[in-house]
């Protein structure tokens, strides 16, 4: 097969594998870090032991994801020096420093504070521990900030120009605050938070439907719901604003997202492709179901129709993205999941208002709880498909309209890249199995509700423990 002898294709495949797999883990740490700040804050305010036990339980999953994230993130960045050395030489003046900020400002802050958050519960003042939890969350989300700065700059390079094959910075802040930066960061921030909330909600629903600590996990489900009511609709709106930016600055990507081959002239609303079978070679869709004028009306939400909506044929083949079918369906998968999660949020909110989520009723909402369990992994799929749209749709450029991907790859023997690609696939499969094993073990074991709460003596802690965990204190004769 030709791709096995193509260094560019193999290097792109390797980076895609490592990037998509790595993203699965920081997604949960960035969002769950905020959730831990919420529940620990509620414990400090109310001194309700349930919130303390929530913080202790969910932090175990945080630590597991943090560890896998570190193990998979470092090899991914090494590829900039091994597989993509010409890219690093060309843009390292800016790109390298931004990745350095991510490591020194963000990762180090998160890693240094994590030790206090994990081991400091009974060793430091609760206020100091809470500050450490906040710093962990800040560090995790600051990593997202710097990574999105770097990637959004690749989408809309600003603040300098390529001179003799090297990007020379003239305005560092203009490069950081490039046109794609704001909505890219907001879109990813809410994506990680929404994904984490639905994971927590799905796990909570699993406990409730299996009648394990239903009262305890109904609290976490309600905290999730109270937060997701704001997050889910806002995420859809920010996603729309991001798509508008693509229309303005990357029209070839928009054409690929919509499998749109022909240009719609100014003043004529473009049709929206609901489902299609794109054919790259024939430069057409073999079949398609369209909503007349649909895309034009979506774009008119903010744009007037004075601009044409360009089709792929308006761009030379060497300057437009290929794999149109992958981009097209990845985009629809992301959007479909976004609206599905909003719908689940509305249904759950309605049941909450009807009193169906009260402790005495919540176990009866089996269909709703099963929907939350099913929704738990959907955010991961939406994020990975979103990154496919973002990066595959940027092709054939690594730095949009300035540096081509073919000029960014290292000239390595294809056999070497194939060997490392297979190695990564094997190791990451093992890591995935390990993470699922230990994650399921944490979930099966459940929270330790007998764990002593700082500031509360043992007797009080036992008195607040659910009855099924209390020792049988009847006389021996009565027990017999």
Image (cartoon, rainbow, N blue to C red):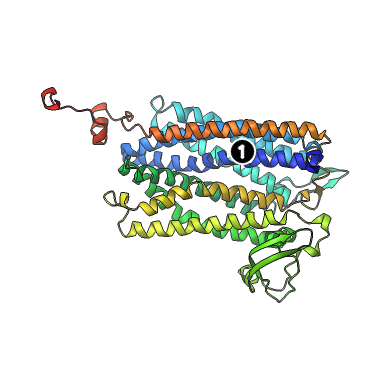
Q: Which quarter of the figure has residue 71?
A: top right
The residue sitting at 76% across, 55% down in the picture is: 321
Residue 109 locus on image (x, y percent)? 56, 33
Instruction: Check the image and name the residue furthest to the front.
Output: 1
The C terminus: image quadrant: top left
Measured as percent of width and height from the top left, residue 343 is found at: 46, 59
Residue that sits furthest to the right in the current view: 164
Whether residue 134 is situated above or below residue 125 in the rendered picture = below
Side of 202 relative to 352 (left or right): right
Q: Hey, which residue is sitting farthest left in the picture?
A: 477
Instruction: Point out residue 255 in the picture as x, y percentages from the top left corner.
Output: 72, 62
Secondary structure, mark 1, is helix
Give the camera-side residue of 454 and 274: 274
Q: Position of residue 370 (x, y in %)?
A: 41, 50
Q: Is residue 357 above or below residue 40?
A: below
* Residue at the (45%, 35%) spot, across then down: 440
The answer to whether residue 42 shows anywhere in this view is: yes
Task: Determine if residue 174 is in view.
Answer: no
- On screen, residue 345 versus residue 146, left or right, reads left
| Residue at the spot of label 1 | 22
Which quarter shows the N terminus? top right
Instruction: Place residue 18 in its image quadrant.
Output: top right
- Crowding at mark 1 (Cα within 10 Å: few <14, some 14-19, many 20+): many
């Amino acid at each position: 097969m030709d791709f096995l002898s193509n260094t560019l294709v193999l290097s792109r495949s390797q980076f895609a594998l490592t990037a998509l797999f790595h993203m699965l883990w920081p997604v949960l740490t960035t969002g769950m870090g905020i959730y831990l700040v919420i529940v620990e804050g509620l414990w400090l305010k109310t001194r309700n032991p349930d919130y303390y036990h929530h913080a202790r339980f969910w932090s175990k999953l945080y630590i597991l994801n943090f560890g896998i994230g570190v193990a998979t993130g470092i090899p991914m960045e090494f590829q900039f020096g091994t597989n993509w050395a010409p890219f690093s030489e060309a843009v390292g003046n800016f790109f390298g420093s931004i990745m350095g900020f991510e490591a020194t400002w963000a990762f180090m802050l998160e890693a240094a504070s994590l030790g206090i958050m994990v081991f400091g519960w009974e060793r430091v003042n609760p206020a100091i521990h809470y500050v450490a939890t906040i710093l962990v969350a800040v560090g995790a989300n600051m990593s997202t900030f710097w990574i999105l700065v770097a990637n959004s700059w690749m989408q809309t390079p600003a603040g300098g120009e390529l001179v003799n094959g090297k990007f020379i910075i003239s305005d560092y802040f203009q490069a950081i605050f490039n046109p794609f930066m704001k909505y890219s960061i907001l879109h990813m921030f809410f994506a990680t938070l929404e994904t984490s909330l639905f994971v927590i909600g799905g796990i909570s629903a699993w406990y409730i439907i299996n009648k394990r600590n239903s009262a305890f996990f109904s609290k976490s489900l309600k905290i999730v719901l109270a937060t997701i009511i704001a997050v889910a609709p806002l995420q859809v709106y920010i996603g729309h604003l991001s798509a508008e930016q693509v229309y303005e600055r990357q029209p070839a990507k928009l054409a690929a997202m919509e499998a749109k081959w022909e240009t719609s002239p100014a003043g004529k609303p473009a049709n929206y492709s609901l489902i299609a079978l794109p054919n790259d070679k024939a430069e057409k869709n073999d079949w398609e179901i369209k909503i007349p004028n649909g895309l034009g009306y979506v774009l008119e939400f903010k744009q007037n129709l004075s601009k044409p909506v360009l089709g792929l044929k308006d761009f030379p083949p060497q300057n437009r993205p290929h794999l149109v079918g992958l981009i097209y369906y990845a985009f629809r998968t992301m959007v479909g999941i976004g609206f599905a999660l909003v719908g689940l949020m509305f249904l759950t909110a309605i049941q909450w208002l009807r009193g169906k989520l009260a402790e005495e009723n919540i176990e009866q909402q089996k269909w709703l709880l099963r929907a939350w369990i099913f929704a738990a992994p959907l955010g991961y799929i939406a994020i990975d498909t979103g990154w496919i749209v973002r990066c595959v749709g940027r092709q054939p450029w690594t730095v949009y309209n300035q540096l081509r991907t073919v000029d960014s790859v290292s000239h390595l023997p294809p056999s070497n890249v194939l060997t490392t690609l297979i190695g990564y696939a094997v190791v990451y499969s093992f890591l995935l199995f390990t993470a699922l094993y230990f994650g399921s073990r944490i979930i099966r074991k459940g929270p330790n509700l007998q764990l002593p709460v700082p500031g509360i003596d043992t007797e009080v802690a036992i008195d607040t423990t659910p009855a099924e965990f209390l020792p049988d204190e009847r006389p021996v004769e009565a027990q017999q």
